[in-house]
Amino acid sequence: MKAKKLWIVFAGLLLLLLGLSLTLLLFARSVKADPTPHVASLISAAKEAEVKTALAGAPWQGLRYLKDQNTWRFYGFTGETQKIELIHPIDLIKVYYLGAQGGVAFTWAATEIHFPRQQDYTLTNGKVHSGQLVAVDLSGEFVDEQGVDWAKCDLEYCHYAELVDTMIVLDDQGTGLSNGFIRYGWGLPSYPFYGFLCWEITPSNQVAILQEVR
């Protein structure tokens, strides 16, 4: 009889643990990912002042949709560069921009993707280096006022960009970095292995020339 009672108590504890585990799992799935995934990073007061001064010379602040060009664009100020390997070797540049609250934030943007057995894919128009005011654009037939649909593009670049964009899914709708930034103003990662932008980068003084060419 005593053994039977112990078994019942044990079975009850096991069921309780299973129930608790299931509850925690369901809760974890229901919680949205942090829309601003990043590692701790501080921007010095001097750097913030430098960036704000540079961005004051931009045609506008923040992200805009240019309907006549089918383009999403924001202006940023470039910082350091680095190379990483994320499936393919990538050249990146740090881009400072004004966040939704008016403070200076930064993310990383690809300047060149080194695909194996293919020509390198360049995302810069003109010479881009540290310390420049630049336009950062997302455009193409797969872009509209709602954001980007990478699946509508068959280029290897688009397949890679979609992978990078959705390394961290920001909500239960499958929203990636670019669409989170466009639709909701969510911040962008400051750590490149959480994702980075695969948008085009153009020195601001060459934007008008580029538009005429297009």
Image (spheres, rainbow, N blue to C red):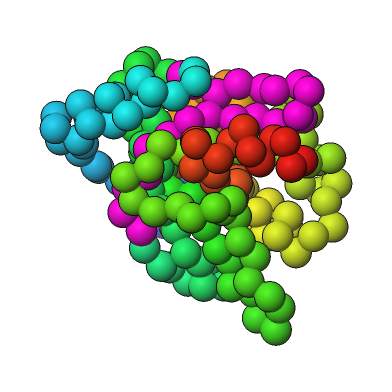
Residue at figure coordinates x 35%, y 20% from the top left: 56
- Position in image of residue 28 (x %, y %): 51, 38
- Position in image of residue 125 (x %, y %): 59, 51
- Count how many numbered circles sit on residues in the image: 0
Question: Which stretch is magenta?
Answer: 61-81
Q: Nearer the viewer, residue 149 or 211?
A: 211
Residue at figure coordinates x 47%, y 71% from the top left: 85
- 113 with respect to 103 (left or right): right
Magenta residue check for 65? yes
Eyeballing the image, is 100 above or below 195? above
Q: Nearer the viewer, residue 89 or 39?
A: 89
- 213 with respect to 188 (left or right): right
Residue 22 visible in the snapshot: no
Magenta residue check for 69? yes
Residue 83 visible in the snapshot: yes
Eyeballing the image, is 181 above or below 117? above
Residue at figure coordinates x 73%, y 55% from the top left: 158
- Position in image of residue 196 (x %, y %): 50, 49
Quarter of the image where one finds residue 13: top left
Quarter of the image where one finds residue 177: top right
